[in-house]
Each structure stands twice: as structure tokens, then as C-alpha cells.
Amino acid sequence: MLIEDYGLIGDLQTAALVGRNGSIDWLCFPRFDSGACFAALLGDEDKGRWLLAPAADAQTERRYRERTLVHELDFQTDEGSVRVIDFMPPRGVDPDVVRIVEGLTGEVRMRMQLAIRFDYGSIVPWVRRVDNGMRIAVAGPDALALQTPVEVYGENYTTVAEFTISEGDRVPFTLTWFPSHHDAPAPIDPEQALEDTCVFWRDWVERCTYGGRWSDAVIRSLIVLKAMTYGPTGGIVAAPTTSLPEKIGGVRNWDYRYCWLRDATFALDALVVNGFIDEARAWRRWLLRAVAGDPDDLQIMYGAAGERRLLELELDWLDGYEGSRPVRIGNGASKQFQLDVYGEVLDVLHEARTRKLERDEDSWAMQRKLLENLERRWREPDEGIWEVRGPRRHFTHSKVMAWVAMDRGVKAIEDFDHEGPVEHWREVRAEIHAEVLERGFDPELNSFVQSYDSKRLDASLLTIPIVGFLPPEDARVRGTLEAIRRELYRDGFVQRYSHDEESAAVDGLPPGEGAFFLCSFWFVDNLALLGELDEACELFERLLSLRNELGLLSEEYDPELGRLVGNFPQAFSHIGLINTVMMLEQAHALQRR
């Protein structure tokens, strides 16, 4: 299936992808970054999946229940129609996936096939039936319990059921993970769980302060960001998937099931601006725990609970999505030095302060330590926002974000009465600013450049007016926008950077990828800041149209194939959507004055 053919369900600790064919093809238990028990997404049906669909051919239609993460998939057959309702209740003791088959019209023959394959499709479990009709699958530390009133049987190392559902019938299936050394969990009430799940999501959405023109798109994206929050700690993962390719058949396949400081801060900006202060508070606590220790040991990403060791491995038994190999788990970029994360962390904590998040002296002490460390290190080359696997460089965007960190430190003292060496930080801020203007801007190109003294462009330069490094009306900002329009703007999308032989020397990988949605949203932001609202709205509406019918976006879009690529759904993309809406609303408000 295409990536856009999937929907997301989750319980704030893990998530699953449900296909429009009724098959759950990806699910990791008990956490986002645990081994998958369904990995058909990255291999074939034998690598694990849970199919629940009519036995005959059917037309499908799907949606989320309004303002929830409850997925509804309608099947229309010659015999009649049924609805499969999929959701994961917010986590109790053990995580559950609940599927309720509802008869809409006629009588429809249904088939259920459950192929459990622990450890990313590599382990076939031992399955047994217990006294109450429950089926339990066990392998090593993992166990899954299937509960349903339907009679099930074994077939070719899978659990199968065949049944007929009539108009008005409702047949539940519940799959629950538990540690294999524990007793099997007590049954839950699927209908009560459905009601509770709807109430949970709708109550959460009620806190949203935005109600403008693009409210539906913003709320769906906010729900996606909330679904990628690891509830016990407040960490936010970049995506619930690994190794969905940035180019079909290519090698740019990465594990995004971790908490990038950058991605999380962008996500929190989007949440905080829309009234979700509790998430900022929880993330601030997560950050304090994750980065505790020597600031020189600051990582750019951590596990959901703050784990530091994210060893990158290749799973050679998985063929990859549409043959895109290798399939990777873990992420070697966790050991990279990326200067820009200092700016993103200080910026989001500054934004939270402006939104009335209460003072926390431990948090401020941590921020001071980060600024002291940054002062020593901002002159060093780094791997940058795109996590290049080539040599370190003096990336212009990284230096701009170092300036942001110092600027937000100064403002914490000027605007919020925190204590610190403000005069010294002002001096460092001015020094960084002057160096970026001298070495990061090319007068011949009339544009900022990817790295010092280079001639290459980079979409990350579009953030310069967004973060306040220069005003949008500055000629150098407009020159950069126009240079990127000439060099990186293709088919209505902005590429991160040019893909050619020289790019391989920069990022250390074969050229070729889709267009990052976030970069295109940044382009719209720049147009909005310049008051060019007609073009900005036209481009934004085009980007909105590329969401699937559930309102979900992946990391990138392949204009040649006309399809989504990259990990899915992607926090960066939904963050870009939300923040661009806020930018457009502000620009329209200024225009009306």
C-alpha cells in the first residue's frame, strides 16, 4: 500500500498504522521504540499484521471520529456494508488495541487474520488457548492476549476467524500486550473503552485556543503531535515509524522513534501557541532529566524516557518498504554535534515563558549551563539540522540558531528578571551576528549560503526572518528567498538543498529524496512575513491538499511519483502546518489594520 493509505491510532505510549484494507501493518509494544509485533509495513504479511475486513471485494471510505484519534473504516460490498472502528485507549496498566466491527447494512462475511511476529517479524510466538477462550501468544519477554466472542482457530502460524455480521451487530476484538512473566490481563469492556477514548480526546482538544479559518487542519495536526507524546515522561518522538524511505528504493531510511530536541521544541512551540501549556511543563521536566550531567554530553536526541544509547543496527531479514533497504533501528545521529539545538531549546522555553509557564529555577540553571557551553563551542563546525553524514562544516543555520540561544538568554533577563551575565551574553550575541553576516552571506549570490564561504543554498536559511535574526524586509532576507526560489523551488516544493555530486560530499549519501514539507511551509512563512498573502495562501492550500483524507502528512512528498514518502506521520510536517497557519493569521490581522 501507499504510505498515505495508512491511518494512525495510539495511546500516548506507542502507535499503530491501520491500512485502508483493514490491516494493521505496524505496531510496536509497549513503547514507540520497542520491537514491532506487526512489521508487514517493512516486509510482507509474514512479518506480522492484523487483518480485519470483508471476505469479498469492497469499496472503502474512512475518517476519524470528530476531534478524536478513533479511526473508522467503512467497507461497502455487494452483500452489504460494515464499519471497523479502531482505537487504542489511553494507557491503563497494559496497552490495548481495540477493533469493533459494526454491521451497517445487509449481511457481510468477514475474515480476521492475526499474524503475530515479535522482534520486527523475526520471532513466531507460541500461541495457546486458555479456559475463557482467550488466545495468548508468548515469545521471550513479550506476550499478547486476544479476546473476542468470535470463534478463532490456528492456520499456518496465524490466528484466523470467519464470521458473518448483520445490520446492527457489533463484534469486538481486543489485543493486549503484557510482560510474559505476568498473568494474562483481565478483559476490558470494548464499548466503554471506546466511549472513554472519545471523551479523552475531545476533552483535550477543548483546550485549543485557535478557532480560525484552518481550524480543522490545525486540530488534526495537534492531535497527531499529542499522539506522538510519550505520556509517562513528556518526551515527543519525531515519528512512530522507522525506515520509511525518503526515496522509494533508496537508502535514506532512518529510525525516527526517538525524541529529537529540535523536533520536540518545534512541536512544543506549536502546542504552546495554541494553549497547551501542560505539555510544555511535562517536556521541561523531561528535558531536565534527559540532559542532566555535563553540558558537553548534550545529545541531539534521546529515547522516550531519556535513554542516551541509541545504537544503530540494520535488520537484514526485512526487505524494506517497497524494497527500500536497509531497514534500520536505532539512530547513529544521536552522537552527532548539532549546534542549532541550543537555539531551539532556549527558544521554546522562552516561548513558554511568554505564555505564562511558571518559573522553574532548576530549568533556568540548566539553561545557563547550556549557554555557558554554547559560548565555548559556537565556533566549532557541526553536522547541522539535516544531520549530514559527511564532514562537519560551519553551517550558517547552525550559527543563526546559536545567536537565537544567546538572544533568548538575554531576553530571559531583560523581560523575565532571571539572573545571568546579560552584558556578556549581549556581546557574544553581537559577535555571532556579525560573523554570520560576514561569512554566511554571499554578496555575489545576494543570498545567505548553506555553510561559511560556500556557494550552495539551503532551505534552512528561510528560518532567518522567522527566528528574528534579521527583519523580513531586509534586502538580504528577500535576496535569500528569491535565490531559493530560483535554485531549490521545484514543482511547488522547496528542496532542502540541491542534490548533485557535490551534495554527496556534504551529506555523505547518494543524492535523491523527496521534498521536505517543512521547507515548503517555511517558504510560505517568508511570503507571509513579506505581506505576499495571495501567493502564500495559494501555496499553503496546495500543501494542505497533499494530506491524506485523514489529514496526515509524512516527512516528504515525491513530486515525480505524486505520493508521500518518509516516516509517517511526521511531527516536523504537522508542526510546519500549524506554525504556518499562525503566521498567515498574523499576517492577515496586520493587513486588516
Image (cartoon, rainbow, N blue to C red):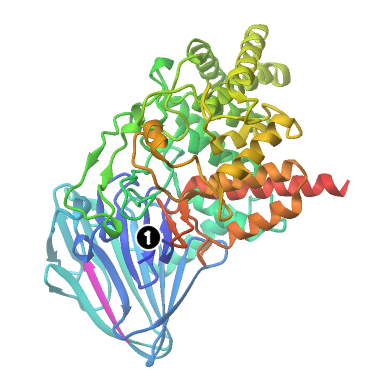
Vertical arrangement, residue 350 with respect to residue 249, above or below: above
The image quarter containing residue 7 is bottom left
Q: Examine the rendering and report whether any part of residue 355 can be seen.
A: no
> Does residue 170 sit above or below 479 in this rendering?
below
Q: Quadrant of the N terminus?
A: bottom left
Residue 267 is situated, as x and y percent measured from the top left of the image, at: 54, 41
Region of the chain picked out in magenta, as a range: 109-114
Looking at the image, which residue is at 34% across and 45% down?
252
What residue is drawn where x is 68% and y is 41%?
A: 526
Residue kind at label 1, given as amino acid type: Leu
Residue at the (32%, 44%) spot, across then down: 33
- Is any atom of residue 572 visible in this view? yes
Q: Quick check: is 1 in the magenta stretch?
A: no
Measured as percent of width and height from the top left, residue 388 is found at 39, 32
Residue 112 on the magenta segment: yes
Front residue of 258/339: it is 339
**Total tally of numbered discs in the picture:** 1
Q: Position of residue 35 (x, y in %)?
A: 25, 48
Please name whichever residue, 246 or 232, is drawn nearer the observer in this view of the structure.
246
Residue receiving disc 1:
17
Q: Secondary structure at mark 1?
A: strand
Task: Relative to 158, say whether 446 is above or below.
Answer: above
Left or right of residue 502: residue 270: right
Left or right of residue 320, residue 180 in this image: left
